[in-house]
Amino acid sequence: MYLDHNATSPPTPAVIARVTELMSTAWGNPSAIHREGVRARQVLEDARPQVARLGGARPSQLVFTSGATEANVTALSHLARDARRLVTVATEHPSVLKPLEAMAADGEIALTIIGVDHDGRCDLEALERALMDADGLALMAANNETGVVADLEAVARLVEMTGVSWHCDAVQAVGRFPVDMNRGPWRAVTTLTFSGHKIGGPMGVGALLTSGDTTVTPLLRGGGQQGRRRAGTPAVAAIGGFAVAAQTALASDWSSVARRRDRLESSLLDTFPGSIVHGAGAPRLPNTSSIAIRADSGWADGEDLVLALAETGVAVSTGAACASGEARPSHVLLAMGADAVQAQATLRFSLGTETGDDDIDQVLGALDTVVRGPQSQPL
Ligand code: PLP
């Protein structure tokens, strides 16, 4: 059973069918003027409005990329051309934090990193002070590890008050709650990014949306593809699949997911008293639960649990997928005040819309067995 949707969401049969079909029907180079090229170009032209709609943008505001990492780095490099004093938050995804830290280390920008409280909420007073003296902000919509959703209204007010440019990584937000660059706090966003494989599309495609009047400087220079905004032949079949996933994501219903996630958490807290749900006091995505597991003998080892659960057919994660395989505790949990042992004891469960009550029962039973041994009573 798969409870790692924040790492990657499985492609739907419709996405697989579309990518498979396009591999044999639209394999031409979309820049070519022959029939094969025109066919491939048409796929891109059809996909562009469908993917843009996921962020409430017009097709002209969208640049296809190789994923959210490239989209984030493109947006940040663009931001740093004009904005030399940048602000970000300690719990951002590494694809935002690492490039910013590298630019700061090279002396290209001055970087202020704002802390978060115990529940992963950004310190808004510190943010306001920092923005008074800055030109750019990188602040994500929802955190991939804890699911904590930023106070977008408050951030948008500060952005509007100070006139800074705002890059928003919306990878975990799109398709989970409405994202619309024409409405509410999203109107304050200058650049917004998301990824194909987090919404049930293929890996290796992502989107960079720009606000109406922003022209992003290309990160990749070379050919004149995508109106000279991103060089390189676009991944036509994958983008076609991305468009199918985007349409499904727009129509998806997360209303019962939070109830299942909450049941998972309350059962785990009953079974393993002293466990900690990270970010429980903040607004969160409906599907995400990040829990430090406390066994009778003390804090569990998250990596051991993930491996033992995998043996039983249950897929969860220790933190960010990108951090798996690294022994270091999650920077997100440390920023929230967890100690290294609690961070290492943490499992991230991320549900999909298809996760059922029986799946939750199965995970609870599997976890009880792997923590307490096969003699434990079924939950
Ligand atoms: N931003 C966030 C919040 C993510 O969760 C991820 C993926 O883990 C990324 C960016 C990077 O996305 P991609 O795998 O498309 O490069």
Image (cartoon, rainbow, N blue to C red):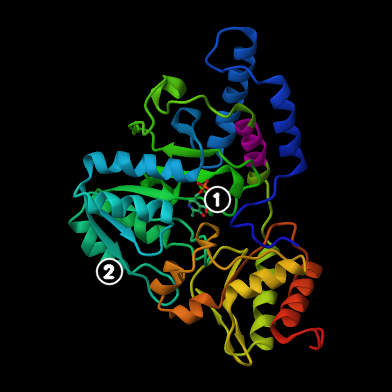
Q: Which one is earlier in the sequence, the residue at label 2 or at label 1?
A: 2
Q: Position of residue 370 (x, y in %)?
A: 72, 79
Q: Secondary structure at mark 2?
A: helix
Magenta residue check for 42: no
In the rendered image, which residue does mark 2 sit on?
125
Residue 155 is left or right of residue 292, and the answer is left
Kind of residue indicated by mark 2: Glu
- Which one is in front, 30 or 158? 30
Query: Taking 336 as reference, is 3 above or below it?
Result: above
Magenta includes 240?
A: yes
Quadrant in which the N terminus is drawn: bottom right
Q: Is residue 183 visible?
A: yes
Residue 178 marker: 1
Give the position of the C terminus as an image quadrant: bottom right
Question: What segment is highlighted magenta in the picture?
Answer: 238-247
Q: Position of residue 140 (x, y in %)?
A: 42, 55
Left or right: where 48 falls relative to 156: right
Magenta region, main secondary structure: helix
* Residue at the far bottom in the pictured view: 296
Q: Is residue 159 visible?
A: no
Whole-percent x and y of residue 269?
64, 84
Which SS class for mark 1?
loop
Q: Badge 1, how many Cα within 10 Å: few under 14, some, many 20+? A: some
Q: Count numbered badges in the picture.
A: 2
In the displayed structure, 151 sits above or below 105; it is below
Q: Residue at x 31, y 41 (%)?
A: 77
Pointer 2: residues within 10 angstroms few (<14), some, or many (20+)? few
